[in-house]
């Protein structure tokens, strides 16, 4: 079930961003918290939705890159705070790639991205044994379409509460 | 999870007919040239004594005709234009009747049900201009297995007229795709080289990727996400038994069998870093072959088992490298712009096929094993994952169209000749990706 929620949320981010015309990439792409949370009504504290809406469950990467951009580090810092506050939670970080690469290379790339995000959370004081990683390569795009905007949304790591 | 699918065991019996084959037949297709003119060939419906036999005979001729036509090297002649009837052929071909409709090669034969329940299929290949029989053979098998006989006959014709091994008696394993692109359902599927006898091997509940045949075509190694742990598996097609390959903390992926079938070479990701490992299937011992901090993946072994080609982004972007099977003698072989991935050593040993990405375009290309002589054979928005026909003459790959924001866009298997000509879409029930061609299937010779 939790996996099914994610794309919906991603879409809502997208729709909202487009609708308000604020929409080029970075504004919403870091999953920054804003007034969005209120639109969802009540959010269960410590839930996946809480993470997605109020913290930001995903960070984005440049083409062929796995290094963290400053927006990404900001999101992960908030995730670390969230995870320390809810210290019974364990998470899986999914690493993803866009479709502009071969399947096997993208699996390796997704693994890199997931591990980079994990390493950053650990550096922020989250215990490594609370964090799994998994790579989906280009197998699970968040946004459909063969265009740069879709690719940018798909080059991501997503932190999913187990 | 895994559906059992045993090969119909083939007891194929050769019965060479007593015929003197001339040492220097005049009829031969020169396939070393880029684009040979297809050879006009007449394939007559195989004869039978009764309706069942005649129906089989017609189907056998159809399969042969389809195979030869798809190769791009033969142009089967419309049966409507035939002058001589099939019945009288069994007495003697009237070569004038075939020359006048521009036939250069003539194929006919007959189908007989034996008293022991087996099917006997006999065929003859004639050079119409030299008025010489080039091949004459008979095969026996279970009636259900008639397609394989048609493929073997196709191979015999191909071999006799091109001087190269055939590839029609072979299969492909691939990934059948369906459903929403965000959560694609992927199933392992297997089919004959011509798309017949299509079967699914997994039920689609688990994501499966990148299947590859063992050298006997009895096993498939692939990657699967059982229990959300992406790992390399081996499936025995006969028994339906599958097993995970090793117990590693990280992801294992990009598997291929060694040419002797005794090892699997693959990538193992440890703390996010993918390196190449070789696992001995008997001892289960694993050997690390690369220790680079870059992504090293998509290994493929040369047919003599001595070298490995793989892709690595150690130079900044993914490029192709070769090394000895123990990891020594590393050599970069691709130097072009863009990204090179999924290298596959040809079964002849002299070429490497690969996916190249340059700008917004993907290409399937080939190069010699030292990296020289690169030729790009296909291009599109996304061409990926070449696999060689057993004779190293044809390359299959998959092509994904651009996806609309609704996720529309087909993904299909294609074949292209080594020369870059004769691009064809393979027929599959659904979307299809990650093709892997089997070796020629084993034939029992008596």
Image (cartoon, coloured by chain):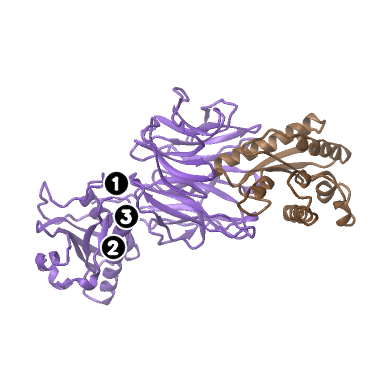
Chain colours: A brown, B purple
The answer to which of A17 and B118 lies nearer the viewer is A17
Can you identify the residue that label 3 sits on? B71
- Dots 3 and 1 on the same chain: yes
Q: Earlier in the sequence, mark 1 or mark 2?
A: 1
Q: Earlier in the sequence, mark 3 or mark 2?
A: 2
Q: Is residue A14 above or below residue B376?
A: below
How far apart are the alpha carbons under marks 3 and 1? 14 Å
Q: Earlier in the sequence, mark 3 or mark 1?
A: 1
The answer to which of B126 and B119 lies nearer the viewer is B126
Locate residue A71 relative to residue A144 in the image: left or right.
Answer: right
Locate residue B188 relative to residue B251 in the image: left or right.
Answer: left
Q: Marks 3 and 2: which is nearer the front?
A: 3
In which quadrant of the rendered image does the N terminus of chain B lie? bottom right
Which residue occupies 80% across, 39% down? A75
Give percent across and percent down for residue B259: 40, 38
Q: Which disc number belongs to residue A12?
A: none
Which residue is the extreme one toward the bottom? B51
Q: Identify the chain of the residue marked 2, using the numbered disc in the image.
A: B
Can you identify the residue that label 1 sits on? B34
Tell me the quarter of the picture where residue B352 sits.
top left
Can you identify the residue that label 2 sits on? B65
Tell me the quarter of the picture where residue A80 sits.
top right
Viewer can see residue B239: no
Q: Marks 1 and 2: which is nearer the front?
A: 1
Q: Is residue B30 above or below residue B307?
A: below
């Amino acid at each position: 079930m939790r996996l099914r929620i994610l794309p919906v949320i991603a879409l809502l981010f997208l729709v909202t961003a487009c609708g308000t015309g604020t929409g080029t990439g970075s504004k919403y792409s870091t999953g920054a918290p804003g007034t969005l949370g209120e639109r969802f009504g009540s959010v269960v504290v410590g839930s996946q939705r809480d993470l997605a809406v109020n913290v930001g469950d995903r960070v984005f990467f440049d083409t062929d890159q796995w290094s963290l951009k400053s927006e990404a580090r900001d999101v992960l810092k908030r995730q670390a705070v969230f995870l320390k506050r809810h210290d019974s939670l364990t998470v899986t970080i999914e690493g993803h790639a866009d479709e502009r690469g071969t399947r096997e290379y993208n699996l390796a790339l997704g693994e890199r991205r997931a591990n980079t995000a994990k390493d950053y959370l650990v550096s922020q004081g989250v215990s490594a044994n609370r964090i799994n990683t998994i790579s989906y390569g280009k197998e699970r795009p968040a946004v459909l379409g063969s265009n740069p905007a879709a690719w940018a949304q798909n080059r991501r790591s997503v932190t999913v509460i187990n | 999870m895994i559906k059992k699918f045993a090969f119909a065991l083939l007891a194929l019996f050769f019965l060479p007919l007593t015929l003197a084959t001339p040492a220097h037949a005049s009829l031969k297709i020169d396939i070393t040239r880029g684009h040979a003119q297809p050879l006009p060939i007449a394939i007559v419906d195989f004869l039978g004594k009764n309706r069942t036999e005649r129906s089989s005979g017609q189907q056998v001729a159809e399969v042969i005709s389809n195979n030869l036509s798809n190769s791009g090297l033969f142009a089967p002649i419309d049966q409507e234009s035939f002058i001589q009837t099939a019945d009288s052929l069994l007495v003697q071909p009237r070569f004038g009747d075939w020359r006048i409709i521009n036939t250069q090669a003539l194929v006919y034969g007959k189908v007989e049900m034996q008293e022991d329940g087996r099917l006997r299929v006999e065929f003859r290949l004639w050079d119409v201009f030299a008025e010489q029989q080039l091949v004459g053979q008979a095969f026996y098998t279970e009636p259900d297995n008639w397609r394989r006989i048609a493929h073997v006959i196709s191979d015999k014709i191909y071999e006799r007229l091109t001087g190269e091994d055939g590839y029609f008696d072979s299969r492909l394993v691939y990934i059948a795709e369906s459903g929403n692109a965000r959560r694609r359902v992927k199933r392992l599927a297997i089919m004959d080289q011509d798309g017949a006898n299509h079967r699914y091997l997994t039920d689609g509940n688990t994501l499966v990727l990148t299947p590859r045949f063992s050298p006997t075509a009895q096993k498939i190694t692939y990657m699967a996400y059982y229990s959300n742990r992406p790992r390399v598996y081996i499936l025995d097609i006969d028994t339906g038994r599958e097993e995970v390959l090793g117990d590693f903390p990280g992801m294992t992926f990009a598997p291929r069998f060694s040419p002797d079938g005794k090892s699997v070479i693959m990538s193992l990701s440890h703390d996010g870093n993918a390196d190449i490992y070789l696992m001995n299937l008997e001892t289960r011992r694993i050997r690390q072959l690369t220790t680079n901090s870059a992504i090293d993946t998509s290994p493929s072994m040369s047919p003599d088992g001595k070298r490995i080609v793989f892709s690595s982004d150690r130079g900044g972007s993914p490029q192709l490298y070769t090394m000895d099977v123990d990891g020594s003698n590393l050599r970069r072989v691709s130097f072009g712009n863009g990204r090179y991935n999924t290298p596959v050593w040809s079964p002849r040993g002299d070429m490497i096929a690969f996916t190249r990405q340059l700008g917004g375009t993907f290409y399937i290309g080939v190069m010699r094993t030292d990296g020289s002589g690169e030729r790009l054979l296909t291009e599109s928005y996304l061409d990926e994952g070449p696999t060689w026909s057993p004779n190293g003459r044809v390359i299959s790959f998959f092509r994904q169209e651009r996806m609309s924001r609704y996720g529309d866009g087909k993904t299909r298997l294609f074949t292209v000749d080594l020369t870059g000509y004769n691009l064809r879409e393979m027929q599959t029930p659904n979307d299809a990706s990650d093709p892997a061609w089997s070796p020629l299937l084993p034939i029992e010779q008596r």
